[in-house]
Image (spheres, rainbow, N blue to C red):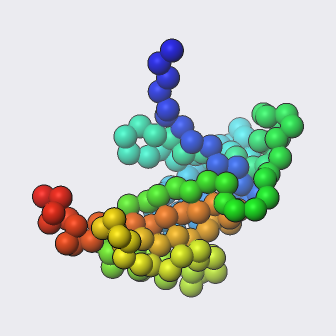
Protein backbone atom coordinates (compact mmCIF):
# COMPACT_ATOMS: atom_id res chain seq x y z
CA UNK A 1 0.00 0.00 0.00
CA UNK A 2 1.25 3.48 -0.85
CA UNK A 3 -0.53 6.28 0.98
CA UNK A 4 -0.17 10.02 0.54
CA UNK A 5 -0.41 12.24 3.60
CA UNK A 6 -2.32 15.29 2.45
CA UNK A 7 -4.22 16.44 5.54
CA UNK A 8 -3.70 17.06 9.24
CA UNK A 9 -6.73 17.37 11.53
CA UNK A 10 -6.41 19.27 14.82
CA UNK A 11 -9.23 18.86 17.33
CA UNK A 12 -10.18 22.15 19.02
CA UNK A 13 -12.51 23.12 21.83
CA UNK A 14 -13.38 26.58 20.45
CA UNK A 15 -13.31 26.86 16.66
CA UNK A 16 -13.53 30.67 16.55
CA UNK A 17 -10.66 31.11 19.03
CA UNK A 18 -8.50 28.63 17.13
CA UNK A 19 -9.21 30.24 13.74
CA UNK A 20 -8.29 33.65 15.22
CA UNK A 21 -5.05 32.26 16.68
CA UNK A 22 -3.92 30.63 13.44
CA UNK A 23 -4.87 33.73 11.43
CA UNK A 24 -2.37 35.65 13.57
CA UNK A 25 0.22 33.25 12.11
CA UNK A 26 -0.92 33.99 8.55
CA UNK A 27 -3.04 30.87 8.00
CA UNK A 28 -6.37 31.71 6.39
CA UNK A 29 -8.91 29.18 7.60
CA UNK A 30 -12.36 29.03 6.07
CA UNK A 31 -15.27 27.70 8.11
CA UNK A 32 -17.32 25.20 6.12
CA UNK A 33 -20.87 26.57 5.71
CA UNK A 34 -22.30 23.02 5.63
CA UNK A 35 -20.33 21.96 8.73
CA UNK A 36 -19.94 24.88 11.17
CA UNK A 37 -17.75 22.70 13.44
CA UNK A 38 -15.08 22.40 10.71
CA UNK A 39 -12.57 24.84 9.19
CA UNK A 40 -9.76 24.22 6.74
CA UNK A 41 -6.74 25.87 5.20
CA UNK A 42 -4.65 24.88 2.18
CA UNK A 43 -0.91 24.98 2.83
CA UNK A 44 1.99 25.07 0.36
CA UNK A 45 2.94 21.73 -1.14
CA UNK A 46 -0.61 20.43 -1.25
CA UNK A 47 -1.03 19.85 2.48
CA UNK A 48 -4.45 20.59 3.96
CA UNK A 49 -4.78 21.66 7.62
CA UNK A 50 -8.16 21.15 9.26
CA UNK A 51 -9.66 22.25 12.57
CA UNK A 52 -12.57 20.23 13.94
CA UNK A 53 -14.46 20.84 17.16
CA UNK A 54 -14.50 18.21 19.89
CA UNK A 55 -18.21 17.71 19.09
CA UNK A 56 -17.44 16.80 15.47
CA UNK A 57 -14.48 14.63 16.49
CA UNK A 58 -16.73 12.66 18.83
CA UNK A 59 -19.31 12.08 16.09
CA UNK A 60 -16.72 11.03 13.51
CA UNK A 61 -14.63 8.94 15.91
CA UNK A 62 -16.90 7.23 18.47
CA UNK A 63 -15.17 6.89 21.82
CA UNK A 64 -12.70 9.73 21.21
CA UNK A 65 -11.76 11.86 24.21
CA UNK A 66 -9.13 14.54 24.78
CA UNK A 67 -6.06 13.34 26.63
CA UNK A 68 -4.65 15.14 29.65
CA UNK A 69 -1.16 16.41 30.33
CA UNK A 70 1.39 17.74 27.87
CA UNK A 71 0.46 19.02 24.41
CA UNK A 72 -0.88 16.29 22.16
CA UNK A 73 0.69 17.80 19.06
CA UNK A 74 3.38 20.22 17.96
CA UNK A 75 3.43 22.00 14.62
CA UNK A 76 6.40 23.97 13.36
CA UNK A 77 6.12 27.17 11.34
CA UNK A 78 9.17 28.55 9.57
CA UNK A 79 9.63 32.31 9.57
CA UNK A 80 11.96 34.39 7.41
CA UNK A 81 14.44 35.51 10.06
CA UNK A 82 15.33 35.18 13.74
CA UNK A 83 13.87 38.67 14.31
CA UNK A 84 10.53 37.46 12.89
CA UNK A 85 10.53 34.60 15.42
CA UNK A 86 10.96 37.12 18.24
CA UNK A 87 8.28 39.42 16.80
CA UNK A 88 5.75 36.61 16.25
CA UNK A 89 6.29 35.27 19.76
CA UNK A 90 5.81 38.76 21.23
CA UNK A 91 2.68 39.41 19.14
CA UNK A 92 1.07 36.13 20.15
CA UNK A 93 1.91 36.35 23.85
CA UNK A 94 0.94 40.06 23.95
CA UNK A 95 -2.44 38.96 22.55
CA UNK A 96 -2.87 36.65 25.54
CA UNK A 97 -1.67 33.31 24.13
CA UNK A 98 0.53 31.24 26.42
CA UNK A 99 4.22 31.07 25.68
CA UNK A 100 5.81 27.69 26.35
CA UNK A 101 9.43 28.55 25.48
CA UNK A 102 10.72 32.06 24.91
CA UNK A 103 12.86 32.62 21.79
CA UNK A 104 16.30 31.06 22.04
CA UNK A 105 19.17 30.10 19.76
CA UNK A 106 19.03 26.31 19.52
CA UNK A 107 22.22 24.31 19.20
CA UNK A 108 21.05 22.93 15.83
CA UNK A 109 21.30 26.39 14.23
CA UNK A 110 17.77 27.73 14.52
CA UNK A 111 16.11 30.56 16.43
CA UNK A 112 13.26 28.76 18.16
CA UNK A 113 10.24 29.62 20.31
CA UNK A 114 7.06 27.79 21.28
CA UNK A 115 3.58 29.18 21.94
CA UNK A 116 0.48 27.19 22.77
CA UNK A 117 -2.68 27.41 20.71
CA UNK A 118 -6.02 27.80 22.53
CA UNK A 119 -6.15 24.02 23.13
CA UNK A 120 -2.58 23.71 24.40
CA UNK A 121 -1.02 22.32 21.22
CA UNK A 122 2.56 23.47 20.78
CA UNK A 123 3.32 25.80 17.89
CA UNK A 124 7.06 26.01 17.25
CA UNK A 125 8.22 29.18 15.52
CA UNK A 126 11.66 28.92 13.95
CA UNK A 127 14.13 30.49 11.52
CA UNK A 128 17.63 29.53 10.45
CA UNK A 129 20.33 31.53 12.23
CA UNK A 130 22.58 33.57 9.88
CA UNK A 131 25.74 31.58 10.70
CA UNK A 132 23.94 28.32 9.99
CA UNK A 133 22.54 29.66 6.69
CA UNK A 134 26.07 30.39 5.46
CA UNK A 135 27.24 26.90 6.38
CA UNK A 136 24.26 25.38 4.59
CA UNK A 137 25.09 27.35 1.42
CA UNK A 138 21.91 29.39 1.50
Q: Position of residue 39 (x, y in %)?
A: 63, 47
In percent of the image, x 18 and y 58: which residue is there? 136
Q: Position of residue 131 (x, y in %)?
A: 19, 72
In percent of the image, x 64 and y 49: which residue is there? 10
Instruction: Give whichever of 59, 65 is nearer the camera.
Output: 65
Q: In the rendered image, is residue 5 in sight?
A: yes
51 is higher (above) or lower (below) than 133: above
Q: Quadrant of residue 101?
A: bottom right
Instruction: Give left or right: position of 24 versus 82.
Output: right
Instruction: Give whichever of 56, 73 is nearer the camera.
Output: 73
Return the residue found at the far top: 1
In percent of the image, x 52 and y 70: which residue is there? 114
Instruction: Give left or right: position of 24 versus 85.
Output: right
64 is higher (above) or lower (below) than 23: above
Q: Position of residue 25 (x, y in %)?
A: 48, 65
Q: Position of residue 6 (x, y in %)?
A: 49, 34
Return the residue found at the far right: 63
Q: In the rendered image, is residue 91 in sight?
A: no
Amino acid sequence: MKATMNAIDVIVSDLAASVAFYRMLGLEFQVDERMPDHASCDLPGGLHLMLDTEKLAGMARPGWSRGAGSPAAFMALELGSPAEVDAAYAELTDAGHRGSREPWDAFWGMRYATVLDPDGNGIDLYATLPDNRERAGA
